Image: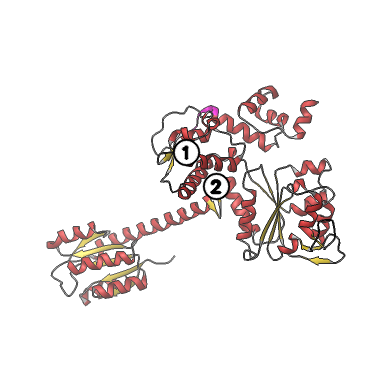
Amino acid sequence: MARERLLIVEDDEDIRTQLSYALQDEYDISVAGDRAKAVAAAQQNRPEIVTLDLGLPPSPDTAEEGLRALEEILAAMPDAKIIVLTGNGERANAVAAVERGAFDYHLKPVNLDDLKVVLRRAAYLRQLERESAAQSRQMEESIRFTDILGSTPKMREIFSVIQRVAKTDATVLCEGESGTGKELVAQAVHTHSPRHAKPFVAINCGAIPETLLESELFGHLRGAFTDASAARVGLFVQASGGTLFLDEIGDLPIGLQPKLTRALQERVVRAVGGKDEVPFDVHLITATNQDLRAAVAEHRFREDLFFRVAVIQIELPPLRARGTDVLLLAQHFVERYGERTGKRVRGLSRVAAECLLGYPWPGNVRELQNCIERAVALTMREEVGAEDLPEHVRARRRPRPALAAGDPVDLLPLEEVDRRHILRVFEAVGRNQRRAAQLLGIDRKTLAGKLARYGAPEASRRGARGRRR
């Protein structure tokens, strides 16, 4: 374990030598005999601890030079623990030094055993501060990853997967409801990959007709079809060296799926109307809000294509399953839109926060973002109030006990705990009501009523077929 660095500032050479000899087994020591040398040594050696004689030249009979040295060392090393040394008759100077930022003082003549106790206490405090700073950095990293915010264990797990998969070219399938941030995950993978300086190209497979989608992906030759007045390079080639993101791949037309499968297998594309095969080099990331396994079982999605695009699967949870991440995201959006509009909006009122926690957010993060943008635009105060939120969000507020400031926001009423648990189980079984009811130990009719009241999404097709039987 590395030793603490100690700077001894003392104009008396005999005392400097005595202190250095006595403390050299515990600390890495540097010394200085005046203010200028002390500041220079602090800037160069970055000591965690300093012993500072207040009676420095050119005015050793006053504390003026020592106090200046104290201020300048702290300016260079704000976290340094400075123990000032002063005579018995100069206790007032020592108190003044503590008021200006010194950690402690020790009266001369120096008692080495007593001084060692003070130094060890200072070293221990610096260690605690470093550990606290490291934990804060770790927490910050877990809360924010590129443009994705989240503090739940599931989100921290997703951050970890992104970091690991970004170092590879394994295809990634992002799954989750609309509005959960699947494209942000794709961008984060690209940003943290060796390909970050190359293009990030995105296309929504469900927004383009089949004939045009093939041309967009693979390119076409001039005259390949009626409107092909000029040749076009496809996105696979345009994104070479970088990342290609195919959003809503579950909507990819069945006739185009074999061509995409072959392209991924051979790493070449053939333009519409052409015969030549052109190689490409992309990291492919796809996304869907559908259950592709069910689509494979129903022959709406090719199994061989599924296995090629789903080497790594990242499932993004719905916002209603992310607990107090709702407030974390809301605060982020408040700050963003407050800055954009020039309004001094600093946060959410307590009642507004309760409304946000009580609403199920069927539109997920995208809906929350729109809600906060509207609220910031409407508010006339320095914090968003419940009256600034849409009526349907206000209506979902649950009565909660009055909590003192600083209490955890996840102290929720029993009904809210029930709501979150039921929705979490419902999502975990693929929205299959029969299976969810079995796990929860309630009948299907009771579960259906609760799901309707809690604003749950529709059941899966598998669950729907179970109800008809």
- The image shows residue 374, relative to residue 195, as above or below, that is above
Residue 11 seen by the camera: yes
Residue picked out by circle 1 = 378
The mark that comes first in sequence, 1 or 2, is 2
Frontmost residue, 165 versus 391:
391
Q: Quadrant of the N terminus?
A: bottom left
Instruction: Check if residue 411 falls in the magenta segment.
Output: yes
Residue at 59% in and 43% down: 366
Where residue 18 sits, quadrant-wise, is bottom left
Q: Is residue 30 left or right of residue 460?
A: left
Q: Is residue 259 left or right of residue 423?
A: right
Q: Which residues are magenta?
A: 409-415
Q: Nearer the viewer, mark 1 or mark 2?
A: 1
Secondary structure beneath label 2: loop
- The image shows residue 313, relative to residue 242, as above or below, that is above
Percent coordinates x, y for residue 106 in the rendering? 21, 61
Q: Is residue 8 left or right of residue 229?
A: left
Where residue 237 sits, quadrant-wise, is bottom right
Percent coordinates x, y for residue 103 in the rendering? 27, 59
The amino acid on which the numbered mark 1 sits, given as a three-letter code, is Leu
Residue 21 seen by the camera: no
The majority secondary structure of the magenta stretch comes to: loop
Residue picked out by circle 2 = 150
- Mark 1 neighbour density, 10 Å: few (under 14) some (14–19) many (20 or more): some
Percent coordinates x, y for residue 222 in the rendering? 82, 63
Q: Are marks 1 and 2 in contact (CB under 8 Å)?
A: no
Residue at 78% in and 29% down: 466
Color style of the picture: secondary structure
Frontmost residue, 12 versus 436:
436
